[in-house]
Structure formats: C-alpha cells, structure tokens
Image (tube, rainbow, N blue to C red):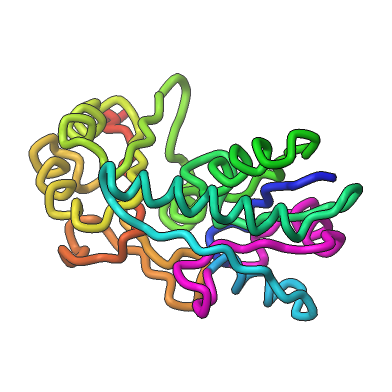
C-alpha cells in the first residue's frame, strides 16, 4: 500500500499540478487535515472544487505555538495515523492532501512518520505543490531573486533573533511564514533595516478573499498563516 502526501497549493485549484490531480482522483481514500471534525479545512476545499464527487476523510490537527503546540500536533499525528491505518488495506493507494508543499511546514511529515511505525510495509511518496510565497511573489514582483542572491525562509512564530538575522541580511531575499502576531515586530525590523519599500504581505492567498499589499500598509492584526516577502536591497544600476 502507498500513502502519498499531495500538495494542493495555497488555495486556488488552478495552481494544483496535473500529478496532484491524478493522485487525488485515483486514490481509494483522500485524507485531509482539519482544525475540528466538523470543520472543512482549506485543503479539503480545494479537493471539493477539483473533484466534487470525492468525500475527504478528515483528520484533526490543532494549531498551537511553542512546546505545547508541538506536543499537541505530535499527539494528533499519532491519532491520525492510527485512524488511517484502520482504513487502509494491502495494495491500496491513499492520498493525504495538504496546503502548499508536503515537505515544508506540513502536517504530512508527522503523519507519515507515525503511519510508517504503525504499518512498516507502507510506502511513502510525495507530490510537490505550489507554496503560498510563490503565489505572493507572482502577484507582487517578477524578479524576487537574481544572480547569487540567497533566500532566508523563516517563521514569524520563531525566535526574534532569527527574524532580526534574516531581515538584517539586506543582500538576501526573505520569506516569513506564519506571520500572525509577529507582524508588528516584522514591520519594525523592516523599517530599522531600510527594507520596508521592498516588502509585501499577503494572506488567504489563492482564495476569493486573497489580500496582498505593501508591508507598511498592512494592519497589525493579520491571519496566522499570513506571509511576508522582502526582496534583496539592490543598488541602482
């Protein structure tokens, strides 16, 4: 049997790859993460638009910060793997859909870890997906990185030192995921290092409520999954 983590992009069904679409359509069961058993998650919403005939099997994942949040997610992943193991049969193909890409800040990695422990013969596969920051960059600029410019990918829920280090590296592009309550500090650091003019923020990317605006104009309260992108500071030619 095989369990495939399928990236369905940031929310727009048009950004789902053909490989992902075919995997979803051919799966015996499609598992989808959700904040609650009765709640429709964004990945499930994408699936419903792609293949309306498919009913996803929801697995619940809480969202939290710090060590308690990590422990809660691990416990939820173990429970999800146990539920999934009770559904899967030998020789079957199963898909676990996730926003963005299954290999980056995704619930799939934890689920796969526990599912493999529960079912040692289980084959794990991944189909990549478009990340939210790629959608943001497509809407905001045609040239985010050039030549040998590096990229810092950091979390708003991470340490302040990491945010300061990334934003302070003016020669590098910066992408900040899970911005949430860290936005005021991010705006402050962007001003301090003279990078505000090169920064944009976006949230609900790929959905009908998609919002993108220059960082200085963004209100201090944004959704937890908001994304910020800051271009390298380049000297005029």
Answer with left or right where residue 2 lies relative to residue 137. Answer: right
Q: Residue at x 71, y 52 (%)?
A: 85
Answer with left or right where residue 117 lies relative to residue 176. Answer: right
Measured as percent of width and height from the top left, residue 199 is found at 27, 48
Measured as percent of width and height from the top left, residue 72 is found at 38, 51
Kindly give the residue lying farthest to the top in the view shown.
148
Q: Residue at x 83, y 58 (%)?
A: 22
Q: Is residue 225 magenta?
A: no
Measured as percent of width and height from the top left, residue 157 is found at 26, 46
Measured as percent of width and height from the top left, residue 217 is found at 19, 63
- Residue 164, quarter of picture: top left
Q: How many numbered badges does the structure rendering display?
A: 0
Kindly give the residue lying farthest to the right in the view shown.
91
Query: Which span is picked out in magenta?
Result: 12-41
Residue 27 to residue 53: above or below: above
Q: Residue at x 84, y 45 (%)?
A: 1
Q: Residue at x 62, y 50 (%)?
A: 81
Q: Nearer the viewer, residue 198 or 18?
A: 18
Residue 33 to residue 237: above or below: below
């Amino acid at each position: 049997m095989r369990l495939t983590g399928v990236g369905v992009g940031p929310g727009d069904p048009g950004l789902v790859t053909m490989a992902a679409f075919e995997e979803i359509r051919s799966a015996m069961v499609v598992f989808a993460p959700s904040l609650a058993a009765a709640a429709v998650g964004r990945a499930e919403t994408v699936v419903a638009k792609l293949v309306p005939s498919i009913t996803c099997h929801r697995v619940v994942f809480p969202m939290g910060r710090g060590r308690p949040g990590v422990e809660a997610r691990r416990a939820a992943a173990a429970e999800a793997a146990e539920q999934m193991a009770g559904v899967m049969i030998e020789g079957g193909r199963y898909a676990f859909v996730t926003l963005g890409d299954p290999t980056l800040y995704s619930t799939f990695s934890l689920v796969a870890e526990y599912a493999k422990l529960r079912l040692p013969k289980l084959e794990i596969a991944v189909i990549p997906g478009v990340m939210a920051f790629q959608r943001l960059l497509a809407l905001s600029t045609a040239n985010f990185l050039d030549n040998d410019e590096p990229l810092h990918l950091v979390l708003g829920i991470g340490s302040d030192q990491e945010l300061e280090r990334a934003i302070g590296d003016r020669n590098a592009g910066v992408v900040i995921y899970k911005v949430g309550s860290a936005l005021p500090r991010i705006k402050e650091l962007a001003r301090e290092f003279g990078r505000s003019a090169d920064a944009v923020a976006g949230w609900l990317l790929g959905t009908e409520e998609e919002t993108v605006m220059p960082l200085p104009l963004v209100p201090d309260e944004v959704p937890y999954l908001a994304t910020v992108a800051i271009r390298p500071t380049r000297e005029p030619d």
